[in-house]
Amino acid sequence: ESLSRRPLLILGVLLIVVGVQLLTFGLVSEMIAAARQEGRGRQVRALQVERVVEDDSHADLGAIHHDPAPQPTGGGSSRD
């Protein structure tokens, strides 16, 4: 069969090419930004992971996990 009868194949290849171009553009722009900061005399900081927090209770949210707020303890009246 000819490629004109396979539009999903053409679309898939096109999306892969566009994805590679976006990734390359992002990397090149990061390199340019770092070079400009070095040229201005600013020191480029290297980021380092200090710790990894694993919490499966909110795994489906895909958000950054923060330490929970402290719960109030005693001292108040409780209603039954």
Image (cartoon, rainbow, N blue to C red):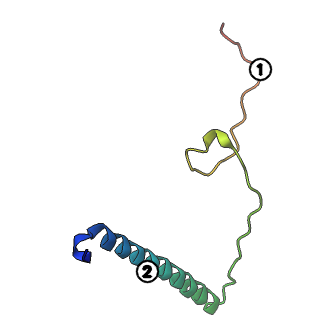
Q: Nearer the viewer, mark 2 or mark 1?
A: 2
Residue 61 percent coordinates (x, y):
55, 45
Q: Quadrant of the C terminus?
A: top right
Q: Nearer the viewer, residue 6 or 55?
A: 6
Tell me the amino acid under the disc marked 2.
Answer: Gln
Give the quarter of the image for residue 44.
Answer: bottom right
Q: Which of pointers 2 and 1 lies earlier in the amino acid sequence?
A: 2
Q: Is residue 17 left or right of residue 64?
A: left
Q: Quadrant of the N terminus?
A: bottom left
Q: Which residue is mark 2?
A: 21
Tell me the amino acid under the disc marked 1.
Answer: Gly
Q: Residues within 10 Å of mark 1 (few under 14, many from 20)?
A: few
- Residue lying farthest to the front in this orientation: 1
- Residue lying farthest to the left in this orientation: 4
Residue beneath the point at 39% across and 76% down: 18
Q: Is residue 61 above or below residue 80?
A: below
Q: Nearer the viewer, residue 80 or 11?
A: 11
Residue 2 percent coordinates (x, y):
24, 77
Residue beneath the point at 52% across and 85% down: 28
Q: Which residue is mark 1?
A: 74
Residue beneath the point at 69% across and 38% down: 69
Q: Is residue 39 left or right of residue 47?
A: left
Q: Nearer the viewer, residue 72 or 66?
A: 66
Residue beneath the point at 74% across and 64% down: 49
Q: Is residue 67 left or right of residue 36?
A: right
**Separation of marks 2 and 1 at Cα, in angstroms:** 59 Å
Query: In terms of secondary structure, where does tag 1 sit?
Result: loop
Number of numbered discs: 2
